[in-house]
Image (cartoon, rainbow, N blue to C red):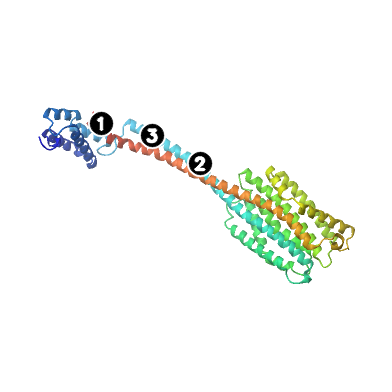
């Protein structure tokens, strides 16, 4: 016999019967089955195999009708055929899918809420950092404005005050830009505090104009800047952690709020004594002396609040940073000025104490700058913590979504794969048994 075993008459007859038996099968399935049978025969028989050997091999395969029926049972000639076991599998898959969907939906909803909340915390932390910078610029502008009010007859606005106003305007624009989007969904108290701050900034131009009037004394300049501008800024900074669920973030916000109070108290003291020393008659009137003393007392109260809320590392940071000869010197200078004003209220401070405006402002600015260094680090800690919380919430949401998707897809794909495996393995089992 020449050619291949497929030319053998018994094989041709077998394949012809197989073709007839597979008429009810889908074309692709019939073609696959026929390819499997012919490939098996071609491998199992030599081209010159005898009738007895061919017949024995075909007998082991089984009848064409049985092979076609087995293939048809695997896929179903007119759609899936559900047995009791199929229904049980479908029920198990349905239960798993429902449980995964319900639990996944609950967890995803929780993760979405956490992501939204942490996103708001992140936004407020960024805004707060800008507000802290604005507050510091306002303090400088206030103190320089008070000194300008004390010697207004000396000429136009000094360059230092003009530069301070420029820095304040730039910081205000940053705050106004970062404030966009803070509204619905945020803590109502925080939103209201922000509105108050923005309203005060819209009045800044008019405040400057009014405070430049020759009739306005330095003490009133300090009072207006503090109450109308710096106060709302510090109130907002203290409120930014109100909506967070993170105790660590809230604690740092509380600590920063206390330190911003200390910083403002120091700046008020700088402003009062700087204005007194800058006047054409460098005096510290009783009303200003009282304000200076009150600011020092308030500094101690705010410092106590800072110490109570700060952790060990934050307290150590303050102790290491706000220290040195300049800090000690300003404390001594202020004590000397208070004593001189009390004992000789009508005598020039510069003559009694030997102080001058520039020296006092420079020395006290060093203490304030050191305090601001600590405040800036706390503001940075708030921003970093808020960013971390946002990143963790986003990762959790992504992980929950992926796990839920897998729990839904895997059982279904497994169920769909079972008939396919049966379809493909049935003919293979037949040809190899």
The CA distance from mark 1 to mark 2 is: 46 Å
Q: Is residue 206 left or right of residue 89?
A: right
Please state which of residues 21 and 119 is positioned toward the viewer in this rendering. Answer: 119
Are circles 1 and 2 on residues that touch, CB within 8 Å? no
Quadrant of the image occupied by residue 65 = top left
Q: Which mark is residue 107?
A: 2
The residue beneath circle 1 is 429
3D distance between C-alphas at marks 3 and 2: 24 Å
x and y percentages locating residue 220 in the rendered image: 77, 63
Element marked by disc 2: helix
Q: Which residue is mark 3?
A: 91
Residue 130 relative to residue 52: left or right: right
Residue 296: x, y in percent? 79, 53
Secondary structure of the residue carrying numbered label 3: helix
* Residue 408 visible within the image: yes
Give the answer, above or below, for where 159 lies relative to 44. Answer: below
In this rendering, position of residue 338 left or right of residue 244: right
């Amino acid at each position: 016999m020449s050619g291949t075993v497929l030319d053998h008459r018994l094989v041709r007859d077998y394949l012809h019967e197989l073709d007839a038996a597979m008429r009810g099968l889908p074309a692709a399935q019939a073609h696959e089955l026929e390819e499997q049978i012919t490939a098996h025969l071609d491998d199992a028989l030599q081209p010159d195999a005898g009738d007895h050997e061919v017949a024995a091999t075909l007998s082991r395969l089984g009848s064409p009708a049985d092979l076609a029926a087995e293939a048809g049972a695997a896929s179903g000639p007119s759609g899936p055929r559900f047995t009791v076991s199929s229904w049980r599998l479908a029920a198990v898959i349905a239960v798993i899918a429902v449980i995964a969907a319900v639990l996944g939906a609950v967890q995803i909803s929780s993760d979405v809420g956490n992501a939204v909340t942490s996103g708001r915390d992140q936004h407020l932390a960024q805004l707060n950092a800008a507000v802290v910078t604005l507050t510091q610029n306002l303090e400088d502008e206030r103190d320089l404005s008070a000194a300008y009010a004390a010697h207004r007859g000396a000429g136009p606005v000094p360059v230092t005050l003009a530069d301070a106003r420029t820095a304040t305007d730039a910081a205000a624009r940053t705050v106004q830009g970062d404030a966009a989007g803070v509204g619905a969904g945020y803590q109502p108290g925080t939103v209201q505090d922000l509105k108050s701050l923005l309203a005060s900034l819209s009045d800044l131009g008019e405040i400057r104009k009014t405070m430049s009037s020759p009739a306005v004394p330095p003490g009133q300049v300090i009072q207006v800047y503090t109450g109308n501008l710096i106060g709302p800024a510090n109130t907002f900074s203290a409120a930014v952690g109100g909506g967070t669920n993170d105790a660590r973030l809230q604690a740092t916000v509380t600590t920063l709020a206390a330190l911003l109070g200390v910083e403002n108290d120091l700046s008020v003291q700088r402003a009062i004594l700087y204005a007194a020393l800058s006047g054409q008659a460098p005096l510290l009137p009783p009303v200003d002396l009282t304000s200076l003393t009150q600011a020092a007392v308030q500094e101690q109260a705010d410092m106590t609040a800072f110490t109570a809320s700060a952790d060990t590392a934050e307290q150590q940071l303050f102790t290491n940073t706000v220290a040195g000869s300049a800090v000690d010197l300003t404390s001594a200078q202020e004590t000397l000025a208070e004593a001189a004003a009390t004992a000789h209220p009508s005598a020039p401070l510069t003559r009694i104490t030997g102080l001058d405006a520039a020296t006092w402002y420079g020395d006290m600015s060093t203490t304030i700058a050191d305090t601001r260094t600590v405040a800036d680090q706390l503001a940075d800690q708030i921003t970093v913590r808020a960013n971390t919380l946002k990143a963790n919430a986003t990762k959790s949401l992504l992980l929950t979504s992926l796990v839920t998707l897998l729990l839904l897809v895997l059982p279904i794909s497994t169920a769909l794969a079972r008939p396919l495996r049966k379809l493909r393995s049935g003919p293979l089992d037949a040809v190899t048994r």
